[in-house]
Amino acid sequence: MMIVMLAVCAAGYAESPSPWARHVIDDSSRGADGVRLGDVNGDGLMDIVTGWEEGGVVRVYVNPGPQLAKQKWPAVSVGRAKNVEDAVFVDLDNDGALDVVSSCEGKTRTMYVHWAPRDPGKLLDESSWTTEAIPATADKQLWMYCLPMQVDGEHGIDLVVGSKKNHAAVGWLQSPDNPRDLAAWRYHRVADAGWIMSLDSTRFDDAPGVLVTDRKGSTRGVYLLQPPTWRRTDIELDQAEYLFGTVVDQRVAVATRDGYLRIYQPDPWRLTSTIPNPFGVTWGKAVAIGRINDDRSADYVTTANIQKTPGKSAVAWIDGETGAVHDISGPQGIKFDRVELIDLDADGDLDVLTCEERANLGVIWYENPTR
């Protein structure tokens, strides 16, 4: 197998003159752990949901529009959930209001639904949200990630879920005829797992699929699952500690804790390049693909955990055409998480939305200076 190392400039790295401007959406709790997007109020702007692992709270942030995006956003705590690892928007009961599903590890080991108020005028009223546990998940596994997806073509939307450590698996929660009856949801185990990091929706062979990254144990790897048969297609197994992955235009990128970003392409699936993590950082965390500057190449934005490499920049972007590495965050922050590329200030370029959980920078976005 040929592995191509993406070239960098002769000096090693081409650093930006200065980090991008950082804007705080919320820093009111502890341990912001992931950002997921959805239009919770129907205004065409992407809103955010985040679970705060150490703070034990799930919060929704309503996008105030480009003119106010650099200020702290209107927010509501939609529920309490200890050890929350992931939170995602989904209209679980098909009433037109986006609910939130949270996944919890630690001693909690349960998934919850935070039901949204049907009256949009009460969206920011904390007392209008209600929280219920999903019985099929209660004290069963260390739940790590949830991907809403229609699996069986029946009833409401289903939930593809992943966990870690003892009895870990990829599985799915099957929606009953009445999704509000949480006791009627059924869990189906699909594949054994060690430590599921991400589940990303994609299409493979012109059918819906799920990209899976598993970071630990004998099952670790990057692979595709295709419901409803759950046919599995391996992309790469047991060659790295795979963290968050993403798929864009049939290109899969996976951050690793082994010093490299790994890129795969299909027909057949193969590793086509390994890219050193920016600034010599070993513990990569997440990656997103998009056009950051004005050329036509797809670039890579990466986040990392710099606990082992203090003083480094944990958020950076790699020019897909030249391989040059550019600073985004500067040395502030330690442990970053998922990353989304979105034009929050409506100036025509992609900004970087992420969160940081160790230095408590919170839910933040970095302003792209290209335009």
Image (spheres, helix red, strand yellow):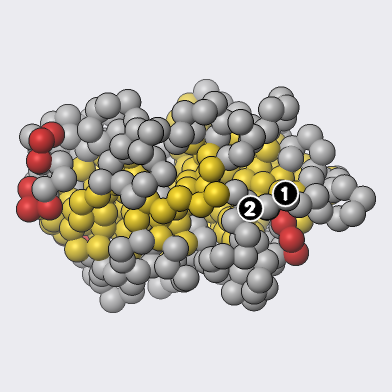
The secondary element bearing badge 1 is classed as loop
- The amino acid beneath tag 2 is Pro
**Residue at the spot x=74%, y=37% of the render?**
320
In the image, taking residue 362 as reference, residue 331 lies left or right, namely right
Residue identifier under label 2: 19
Q: Disc 1 versus disc 2: distance between alpha carbons?
A: 7 Å
Q: Give the residue at x 63% y 59%.
A: 330
The quadrant where residue 12 appears: bottom right
In the picture, the disc for residue 243 is none
Vertical placement of residue 367 versus 250, above or below:
below
326, above or below 257, in the image:
above
For the C terminus, the quadrant is: top right
The residue at which mark 1 appears reads as 16
Task: Give how far across and how far down residue 164 sits, in percent.
Answer: 43, 66
Type of residue at label 1? Ser
- Residue 325 shows up from this direction: yes
Mark 2 crowd level (few <14, some 14–19, many ≥20, 10 Å Cα): many
Residue at (35, 38) in percent of width and height = 68
Residue placed most toward the observer, 126 or 68: 68
